[in-house]
Amino acid sequence: MSEQVSASLAAASARPVHVVPVDLGKAYRLINHGPTVLVSAAHGGRRNVMAAAWNMPLDFSPPKVAVVIDRKTFTRELIEGSGEFALCVPTRAQIDAVCLVGSASGREQDKFAEAGLWAFAGSKTGAPLVEGCVAWLECRVLDEPEMAQRYDLFLAEVVAAWADERLFDGGRWREIDPACSTLHHVAGGVFFTQGEVVQTSRA
Amino acid sequence: MSEQVSASLAAASARPVHVVPVDLGKAYRLINHGPTVLVSAAHGGRRNVMAAAWNMPLDFSPPKVAVVIDRKTFTRELIEGSGEFALCVPTRAQIDAVCLVGSASGREQDKFAEAGLWAFAGSKTGAPLVEGCVAWLECRVLDEPEMAQRYDLFLAEVVAAWADERLFDGGRWREIDPACSTLHHVAGGVFFTQGEVVQTSRA
């Protein structure tokens, strides 16, 4: 790890006490319901964060994810440099920050500072984990350069996962506090929040 | 088109009057908020339908999608035979049918009949479109056999899109009637429905 990256990580806060590890076999559940995520990455002393509605689980075990990351983004440069990123699941309280980091570029500015976002360090990657989110997946990029080239599509293995234990506990989301709902982007800064929990009546 | 497929399509109902075409440039919005979908396909006189939480838009124009389809499924055989499938976006009212077609195999039975689902014909593919859903994307598989082989991942171009105009109109979802909410799978037959619509305060 370069001195610059070390300095950048040293500037990150300590992990909040309510952030607990999630069993890797259950990590897919953190994004299974289709939330818009923040994609964060760091490389060579720089860091960045962007928004991505186009993400999904790709496998259970080892857990994998797929996410679309436009070739014009600075986050993509950092991911291609480091081979790592994190998917962070933001809440309704962060809607303005999500929209800011989803539209501005981080090439000329620190979007964390601009959006009022803080980060803490993960355990397996150097990607900054955004505070105030409810779940985090630390990911290592799988070697599929043609997918990135043709479709801006990144496939990655989840190497560590975290959740806010007040909201996700024992491998399951609790009944959601509407104030802490995940965000599900429709278009143009309009999102659905999470509604009622429903369950099949089939055995 | 084989006689058998023609016969199968002839058995499909006519397109319901409230199902209207969606501009292809807006087709991504039908699944952008992360709903669990039904994947349907037909080939050689057989048809099938399964559930897939792992789906996402992949591009705007021409619109593309990505979806994970397990190699053991009968739907996959039909997709590999025909090169086509449809993503249908089901509602809360269909939760039991979604869970049935998401767990049973269609190799030995007609899951449409089993789950009480009816289908109507699309315009550009032979994939059956499931009635009672709120949106439909007719898709042609892109030639990426290594992705299917390695990750069960299918990439496809959306060649026609449809929506229930009572819920999606002018390229936008209307405020959702809770009874018609899309389903967002957590695990084990438990889903979130859509909640409140929220919008960024950023200009």
Image (spheres, coloured by chain):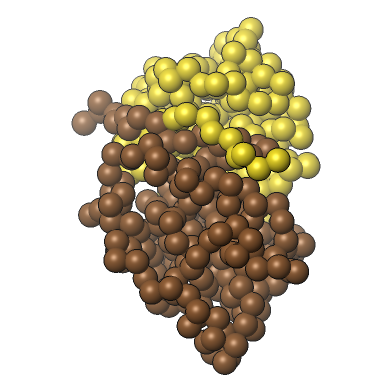
Chain colours: A yellow, B brown
**Picture mark count:** 0
Relative image position of residue A60 (x, y in whole percent)? 74, 43
Residue B201, placed above or below residue B29: above
Q: Is residue A160 left or right of residue A81?
A: right
For the residue pair B56 and B36, the one nearer the viewer reads as: B36
Q: Nearer the viewer, residue A165 or B12?
A: B12
> From the viewer's perspective, is A98 left or right of A79?
left
Residue under the point 78% across and 42% down: A61
- Return the x and y of residue B47 as percentages of the image width and height: 61, 73
Query: Which of the image's four quarters has the C terminus of chain A?
Result: top right
Q: Is residue A62 above or below residue B79?
A: above
Q: Is residue B131 left or right of residue B162?
A: right
The foreground one among B62 and B86 is B86
The quadrant holding residue A42 is top right
Q: Is residue A98 depicted above or below B98 in this figure?
A: above
Classify B39 as above or below A89. Answer: below
In this rendering, does residue B43 appear at all? yes
Residue at 71 percent of width and 56 percent of height: B104
x, y percent for residue B77 = 70, 72
Q: Position of residue B34 (x, y in %)?
A: 49, 44
Q: Which residue shows up at 72% across the image and 21% down it?
A: A170
Front residue of A54 and A127: A54
> From where the camera sits, is residue B53 visible?
no
Quarter of the image containing the N terminus of chain A? Answer: top right
For the view shown, which residue lies furthest in the top direction?
A17
At 31% across and 36% down in the image, what residue appears?
A: A190
